[in-house]
Amino acid sequence: MITIAAVGDIHLGEGMAGSYAADVAAAAREADVLLLAGDLTRHGTAPEARVVAGEFADSPVPVVAVLGNHDLHGDDEKGVTAALEEGGIQVLEGSHTVVEIGGRRLGVAGTVGFGGGFPPATASDFGEPEMKAFAARNRTLAACLGEALCGLDACDVRVALTHYAPVRETLEGEPAEIHAFLGSHLLGEAIDGSAVACGSPVALALHGHAHAGSPDGRTSAGVPVHNVARPVIGRPFRLFALDPDGRPA
């Protein structure tokens, strides 16, 4: 059995030290790994990231994260990442990591992701340079997620971790007008495509960002997708139990 504790959008800031540490300890008693789906800080500053790192520093199980748009707001991605990693949190961006759990290999691939929308209303790589740049970031980060997932072909269980949503279903509850800024179908296609390319399915996909969204959905190929934004799950973490082959237990 592999048990994952996951949450996103905890939005910790300066002056909030001690607000999450007890929850981390409690989750670690039940889970084998803690996954953080971005927006760990309020404004994306290194001092805020050090607060986050302090809350998770005593976790007895591995902590793996992606950044969110709030974590990038301060234009200090390197500083935020360094502060988190100094506290023992592994930050993924178009990369992956492997956690050994009871003789099984859990692989986690992650990216912040980006907006772009879902058919039939998606961002077009046409027109002004700003629009082309928006579409290019969407396409690039989705492709990096697919490559990172394929790099986990030797793992027993694979998980995709993003901040932006890979399916529209988990955005239900958010105004339809902003779906293009909350996720992208290209992330979902990357998750499904990696299974075809690698011959190994993704067990589940976890994301945050959509505070008013819905908790559960699926990709076109049937991969379970869960929105673990703190306002959605209504608790410090949501637990996911998987059998040794990655099926929900």
Image (tube, rainbow, N blue to C red):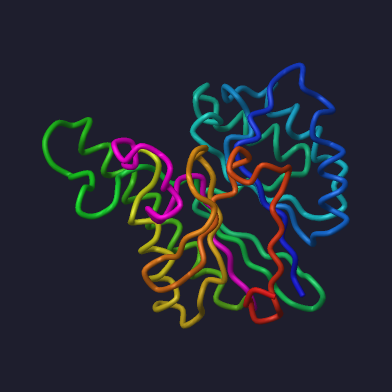
The percent coordinates of residue 42 (x first, y second) are 60, 24
Rendered location of residue 204, percent (x, y): 56, 66
Tell which of 70 and 100 is nearer to you: 70
* Magenta span contains residue 244: no
Q: In x, y percent, where is residue 228?
A: 59, 48
In the rendered image, the quadrant that contains the C terminus is bottom right
- In this rendered view, identify the residue nearer to me: 107 or 228: 228
> Which image quadrant: the N terminus?
bottom right
Q: Magenta segment range? A: 156-180
- The percent coordinates of residue 55 (x first, y second) are 80, 35
Taking the magenta stretch, the answer to whether it contains residue 179 is yes
Q: Does residue 72 appear left or right of residue 8 in this picture?
A: left
Q: Residue at x 84, y 53 (%)?
A: 28
153 displayed left or right of 7: left
In the image, what residue occupies the spot 64% across and 60% down?
97
**In the image, residue 101 above or below residue 130:** below
- How many numbered marks are there? 0
Residue name at image x 63 percent, y 40 percent: 230
User: Residue farthest to the left?
Assistant: 127
Q: Taking 79 as reference, is 210 left or right?
A: left
Which quarter of the figure has residue 46? top right
**Which residue is most to the front?**
173
Judged from this view, the residue extending furthest toward the top is 15
User: On the picture, is 181 further left or further right than 83?
Assistant: left
The vertical placement of 204 against 187, above or below, is: below
